[in-house]
Amino acid sequence: MDSSPHYSVLLEESVSALFAEQCGPRLGGPRSGGPRSGVYVDGTFGRGGHSRAILNALDNNARLLAFDKDPQAIEEAKKLAAEDARLTFYHGSFAELQKALAEKNIAAVDGILLDLGVSSPQLDEAERGFSFLHDGPLDMRMDNSRGQSAADWVNSVAEDELVSSLKEFGEERFAKRMARAIVQRRAQQPFTRTADLAKVISEANPAWEKGKHPATRAFQAIRIVVNRELSDLQIVLQEALKALRPGGRLVVISFHSLEDRIVKRFFRDKSKGKMFPPGMPVTEAMLEKELKLVGKAIKASARELEENIRSRSAILRVAEKLSQ
Ligand SMILES: C[S@@+](CC[C@H](N)C(=O)[O-])C[C@H]1O[C@@H](n2cnc3c(N)ncnc32)[C@H](O)[C@@H]1O
């Protein structure tokens, strides 16, 4: 049952950022224009908060293609698509952007929004197995209809790979100790529940931080591995660049530094263009810049933080495809 309220993060800022001249005040541009035409992509439908807001801004001939890995999210998208023929959906990763566009006969798009990470329902429903607070089956798959669950991975991964994953994707200082404890315990009894894993990880953590569950970083790492979150992000950024029409916007909301670093570097590299040896005479055209940065990174306003504490780690970046 999906009873948890879902709050769409940076809703106004991200949706207005999608529409070229129609920048929200915090992005620095003037507000103008009526309903927009064109084809847009919501790469992370979730419960459809951003999609609904995008649809509200579109005219009758515009289209919105929504992606989600999560079967429950796709059920919601199906319901909305039954009410609004401008919406179509794709069950799968946004990393399959080109494939999905080809299937839907879409040659190019005018804007792409990615609101990364897990949704509130995924986090709050113990049955989805993301939570160290509420015991549930150790699953953590956004797409729980296929692929390897967290339990499959935790119970079979080599110890050195476990260490490097906890370090790389959780920035966990005590990765070695945690991996050792996990490997020792699973030899006696494999993990099946989130609370059990959280307990073993917590006991292996010698330095609990105030206000932070001692298994937070390790759970983040496992979730990222199980859902291939960072590799999907790297792929979709490249694919988005190919899919966008010149002038089209790419709007990304990240929730942790690993995601944001990937987005920030991609935007920076594509907006600087090609690298040449120092001293070589270089014209603007030779740089072949592909993106223009739009405004600075945006964080949730004080009002939004009051309403939804989960938005505290959200960071929004916007870039525009340049014509070549
Ligand atoms: C933060 S929520 C999005 C919430 C949504 N914007 C809303 O307003 O309801 C992230 C959603 O993206 C989905 N997701 C995350 N990574 C994905 C990927 N690589 N491909 C497709 N969906 C993904 C998750 O399953 C989750 O439903």
Image (cartoon, rainbow, N blue to C red):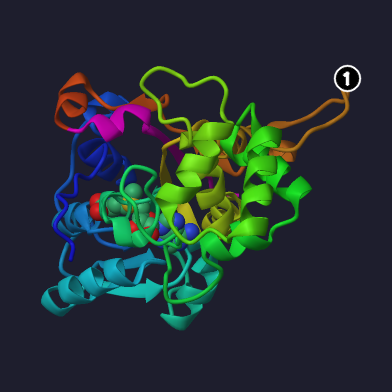
Judge the density around disc 1: few (<14), some (14-19), many (≥20) Cα neighbours within 10 Å. Answer: few
* Residue to which mark 1 is pinned: 279
Q: Where is residue 147 in the image (x, y as percent from the top left)?
A: 54, 72
Find out whether residue 314 is within the magenta segment. Answer: yes
Beta carbon at label 1 within 8 Å of ligand 1: no
Residue drawn 28% across and 34% down? Answer: 310
View extreme (left): residue: 83
| Residue 277 lies in the magenta-colored region | no
The answer to which of 145 and 318 lies nearer the viewer is 145
Please name whichever residue, 254 or 223, is drawn nearer the observer in this view of the structure: 223
Q: Residue at the location (38% across, 74% down)? A: 90
Identify the image quadrant of residue 39: bottom left
**In the rendered image, which quarter is residue 193 located in?**
bottom left
Above or below: residue 255 compared with residue 211: below
Query: Residue at 42% across / 70% down in the picture?
Result: 144
Task: Measuring from the top left, give residue 117's x and y in whole percent.
Answer: 42, 48
Residue for point 56% across, 69% down: 148
Q: Give the range drawn in magenta.
A: 308-324
- The one nearer the camera, 254 or 167, is 167
Q: In this view, does 101 lie above or below 261?
A: below
> In the depicted view, which residue is nearer to us: 178 or 146?
178
Relative side of 57 to 28, left or right: left
Picture quarter containing residue 62?
A: bottom left
Q: In this orientation, does residue 83 appear?
A: yes
Query: On the rendering, which quadrant does ligand 1 occupy?
Result: bottom left
Q: Where is residue 259 in the image (x, y as percent from the top left)?
A: 52, 39
Q: Tell me the quadrant of the picture where the N terminus can be found.
A: bottom left
